[in-house]
Amino acid sequence: MVEPFAKFTGFSGGLSGAGLGFSHSASTGGSGRTPFRSHSFNVGPRKEKPQDPPIEHDLYVSLEDINRGVTKRMKITRRVVANDGTVRKEDKVLAINVKPGWKSGTKITFQREGDQAPNKIPADIVFIIRDKPHPHFKREGSDLKYTCQISLKEALCGARAAVPLLGSEERMVINV
C-alpha cells in the first residue's frame, strides 16, 4: 500500500540536514519516490510584527432595523502600502449584517482592515451596535418599554390607552 506524501525520516546523513527527503506519490509511475524540500530547520527566534490597537466606531441602528435585521454598509478610508513602498489612500466599503435581536454593545470585528504600515500588522476595525433613540420606545435588555401618561383617576378607575406598534402606524388599544 502506498500512502501519498508520506515523509521518510530514517536518513542518517547530509540529505535530511539539508531538508531533502522523499515522498511517495501514486502518480509517479516507476518507483513512486519523488524528491521534495522540507523547511524544518530553525533559523532563530522569530519576531512578531506589532499590531496597532483596534479602531472602534459606534454604529447607530434603529429599533425597527434591529427588529427585522438589516445590512449596513460603512465606507472607510485607509492607507495602503503598495509593493514598491508607496503609500496611497483607499476607500473600502464594509458590509455589516445586523441580525434581528442584536443587543446594544454587540461588537462586529473586521480583522486587519486598518491602515497599513511597513513592519506592522494593520489594526482591526470594530463596529459597536448602539440603539438609535426612538420617539416612543426605549430598549432595556430584551424588552421594549413604552411610557404612557395617565391621570391618577384613570390609574385608579381604569382607562384605555393606544400603544403604537414598532415599525407600523397602527396602534394597539389596551386597558390600564
Image (cartoon, rainbow, N blue to C red):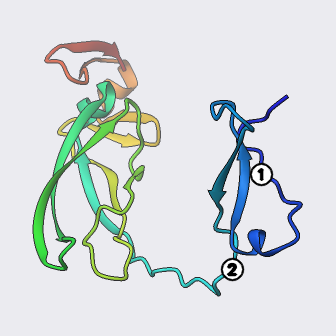
Rendered-image quadrant of the C terminus: top left
Sequence-earlier tag: 2 or 1: 1
Q: Which percent across, then down, holds residue 101?
A: 41, 32
Disc 2 designates what residue?
A: 42
Residue at the image position 31 percent from the left and 36 percent from the top: 97
Q: Find residue 28 and report its image quarter.
A: top right
Q: Nearer the viewer, residue 108 or 41?
A: 41
Task: Name the residue type under label 2.
Answer: Asn
Q: Which mark is residue 120?
A: none
Q: Nearer the viewer, residue 83 or 169?
A: 83
Residue at the image position 10 percent from the left and 72 percent from the top: 88
Q: Which percent across, then down, holds residue 174?
A: 33, 14
Residue at the image position 82 percent from the left and 54 percent from the top: 8
Q: Secondary structure at mark 2?
A: loop
Query: Does 164 sit left or right of 90 as displayed?
Result: right
On screen, residue 133 above or below 31? below
Task: Name the residue type under label 1.
Answer: Lys
Disc 1 designates what residue?
A: 7
On screen, residue 65 above or below 95? above
**Of all residues shown, which one is farthest toward the front?**
30
On screen, residue 125 above or below 53? above
Disc tally is 2
Whether residue 149 appears in this view of the structure is no
Whether residue 5 appears in this view of the structure is yes
Q: Which percent across, then down, holds residue 160?
A: 28, 15
Q: Is mark 2 in CB contact (under 8 Å) with mark 1?
A: no
Q: Which percent across, then down, holds residue 67?
A: 32, 28
